[in-house]
Image: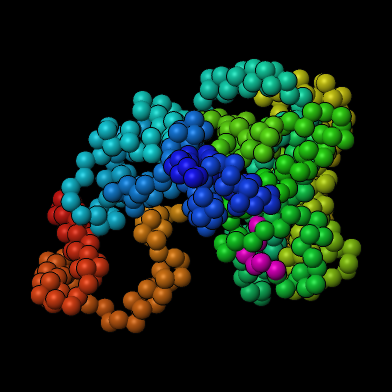
Amino acid sequence: MSGKRKRVVLTIKDKLDIIKKLEDGGSSKQLAVIYGIGETTVRDIRKNKEKIITYASSSDSTSLLAKRKSMKPSMYEELHRAMLEWFNQQRARGNPISGPICAKRAEFFFYALGMDGDFNPSAGWLTRFKQRHSIREINIRNERLNGDETAVEDFCNSFRDFIEQENLHPEQIYNADETGLFWKCLPSRTSVVKGKCTIPGHKSVEERVTIMCCANATGLHKLKLCVVGKAKKPRSFKSTDTLNLPVSYFSQKGAWMDLSIFRQWFDKIFVPQVREYLRSKGLQEKAVLLLDNSPTHPNENVLRSDDGQIFAKYLPPNVASLIQPLDQGVIAAMKRNYRAGLLQNNLEEGNDLKSFWKKLTLLDALYEISMAWNLIKPVSISRAWKQILPHVEEKEGLDFDEEDISVGTVATILQHTKGLENVTTENIEKWLEIDSTEPGYEVLTDSEIIRRAQGQTDESSENEEEEIELIPEKHINHAAALQWTESLLDYLEQQGDMILPDRLVIRKLRATIRNKQKMTNSSQ
């Protein structure tokens, strides 16, 4: 008689490993045997793949994921979602995040979400929030995060110790960084507006994509640009196979980088290309990818090759803006190359500005931005690492002779461009820098964070706004709204055939109105 299989409870890390093995072609039957679980459990893990990855991606600690065995929802689930979104955005910007600041924001989101009952964002709550999401870097002492020169020195020293311990060559050290690009934007004789062409007589057009650059510390291995656009297959692609594009193209409804796309890029593009490059150089197939704390970057638990030899490491939030290599003029130079290249192409083709604007497609832009990236010389990239790895330039013996695209260079081109002959130097500079601070991730307002935490989609929000516009304006105070909800709740509770969810919805609405009334009264 066969013995009963011992019940196995998998950790989150185990589930991540199973997901990766399934994606690599592993069978449910084989994995069930390896992990001592049923095939149904493996199928459930496959079904909940995105949920597991999203949960793991929000964690800062590999060790905690190796211990945690469930994703049990918190009684403050919506509040946790809102706080995590807010926290990730603040950390990406390098803003100070202290215990008191977190407590204040938690209280704000609690009332804004319309949650019922009383809430005390105590030190105990903050500790549980940190543990739940494996967050280590909430600075309780409220030290300054931006521009911390001491922190830069500390990180650089520890990173050099790390690469020495790991025996990594500069060829094996990479950086990736995203930025927004307004690809269909030309300078104006009057002004430049973000993402729009302001040529007199032309309709304003907004066109934006997210671009991610990635290269190693020597600058000798530059991966194809990763581009995220809105459309899965833009009309300009026609019959073009996306695999044959000069960039790695992904789509997302807002043209933003997100956790899923970044992970796909890491697993399917970064790891294989790095392996191939290092093999060609006769180096061990081992590498580290240095990243900033963008909300779209999964943590080290997710960004790791199967054998653990290619992995990610994060810059501390208080130093990323100061020393992230590709952000030290490399991306800016690429964008200048792109914009100057567009104008030069127009000049060479003999087009007037109107024809050029009409014909420019996303496919054209992808080829042009790819060329602009190719024009970045290895020395520019290796020089950008000088704070982290000061000896890379000398070791590689690279040529430092490089021409930079200046305002003067662009002005010379514009002198021969019909319609733009009189663009001022100031407007040229604004045009060249128009998206210099544009992030590659979506920056949410408090209202958007709240809607997302409640599970509302952008589409439903838009529909609600349209419906509101059709209703004649009528002011209803909190007391009247509260009285109506009380009456409606009494009615529902008297109906024996009404299901529980109906009453819960009205109770939640009542709590929202009560909190709004409380906030209004306290501000008076």
Figure quadrant of residue 502 = bottom left
Which residue shows up at 69% across the image and 32% down it? 309
**Camera-side residue of 411 and 161:** 161
Which residue shows up at 83% across the image and 64% down it? 346
Which residue shows up at 80% across the image and 24% down it? 393
**Camera-side residue of 350 and 412:** 350
In the image, residue 104 lies at what x, y percent? 29, 41
Above or below: residue 306 compared with residue 425: above
Main SS of the magenta part reads: loop
Please give left or right for residue 303 compared with residue 91 in the image: right
In the image, residue 473 lies at what x, y percent? 26, 78
In the image, residue 118 lies at what x, y percent? 18, 47
Question: What is the image's colouring?
Answer: rainbow
In reply to whether residue 249 is colored magenta, the answer given is no
| Residue span colored magenta | 228-233
Figure quadrant of residue 172 = top right
Please give left or right for residue 347 compared with residue 480 in the image: right
| Residue 419, visible in the rendered structure | no
| Residue 192, visible in the rendered structure | yes
Above or below: residue 497 compared with residue 420: below
